[in-house]
Amino acid sequence: MNVPTELRAGIRDVLPLFLGIVPFAVVFGVAAVDAGLTAVQAVGLSVFVFAGAAQLATLELLAANAAVPVVVLTAVVINLRMLMYSASIAPYFRSLAGRSKAVMAYFLTDQAYALSVAHYGPLGEVTTGAPGSDDASDGGHADDADDDAGDADDHPDSGPTTSSLADRRWYYLGVAVSLWVVWQLGTVAGLVLGTGVPESWGLDFTVPLVFLALLVPAMKDVPTTTAGVVGGVVAVAAAGLPLNLGLLVGATVGILAGLLAERGRR
């Protein structure tokens, strides 16, 4: 079997991250059991949403009997960063067909974005097609056959390790699909483990523990630290709001504070 080199490279590069992803997925499965979800509901949430932080926030709100619109809106706010990821990585896949972009967008995660962009190299070294080619003339809506044409048109110096659109796509899928598979298996493992844990043990602490594990490493500079601190303080202060809107208010205010801090730094 001829497995593309970049697919293998993507799988190889993402392997170390499984040390963090597997426990996270298991915790989500356990927390889903603790929140009263059935196995089908938990797996369905994991497959449909496929976003760890949003899934855990959803569990918290469902367990607190929050209104469905609040649950959905909170998940959307938490995942707003995916808009920025999409805008950043889109130039590397501009000549892909729309359906291919939709599939790849579904698999987009923090880890898939970070590894892929780092592997592709500086954006300035990547082109999507020569003038007059399908890539340049159809606004990025070429079909899959055109993808191959786009590959041939890629700039010869399009990145230190991936020189064609096909390479970039294989690498992305190697990382992203591997993460998806491990996340789903971890969720199922958590569901099995959760049903075997005595209720008297109590597992409520697992969800905030995971959020702290996600938050602290992300607070690397003034804007992210400002967003985390302000969002946390506001969420605690607004905890008494009806429909559990405190989390949503805290997340929104935290994001705005981070954006203001980023603007002030420039």
Image (cartoon, helix red, strand yellow):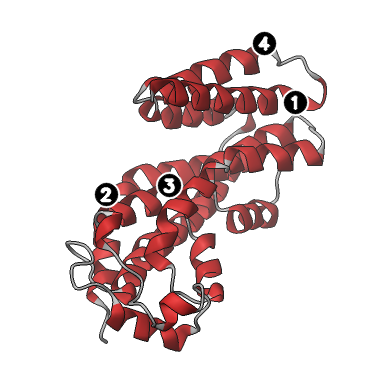
Mark 3, Cα crowd under 10 Å, few <14 / some 14-19 / many 20+, is few
The residue that mark 2 highlights is 16
Q: How far apart are marks 2 and 3 (CA)?
A: 15 Å
N-term mark: 3 or 4: 3
N-term mark: 2 or 3: 2
Mark 2, Cα crowd under 10 Å, few <14 / some 14-19 / many 20+, is few
The residue that mark 3 highlights is 110
The residue that mark 1 highlights is 245
Q: Is residue 31 above or below residue 257?
A: below
Q: How far apart are marks 3 and 1 (CA)?
A: 26 Å
Q: In this view, does 50 lie above or below 66?
A: below
Q: Which amino acid does label 4 sit on?
A: Ala
Q: Which amino acid does label 3 sit on?
A: Asp
Could you say whether the residue bearing mark 3 is in a helix, strand or loop?
helix
N-term mark: 1 or 2: 2
Give the x, y percent position of residue 226.
47, 18
Asked whether the beta carbons under mark 1 and mark 2 sit within 8 Å of each other, the answer is no
Q: Quadrant of the N terminus?
A: bottom left
Could you say whether the residue bearing mark 2 is in a helix, strand or loop?
helix
Q: Which amino acid does label 2 sit on?
A: Pro
Asked whether the beta carbons under mark 2 and mark 3 sit within 8 Å of each other, the answer is no
- Could you say which disc has been placed on residue 43 in the image? none
Q: What residue is at 40 percent from the left and 46 percent from the top?
A: 21
Q: What residue type is labelled 1?
A: Leu
Q: Distance between the residues labelled 3 and 4?
A: 29 Å
Is residue 186 shown left or right of residue 42? Answer: left
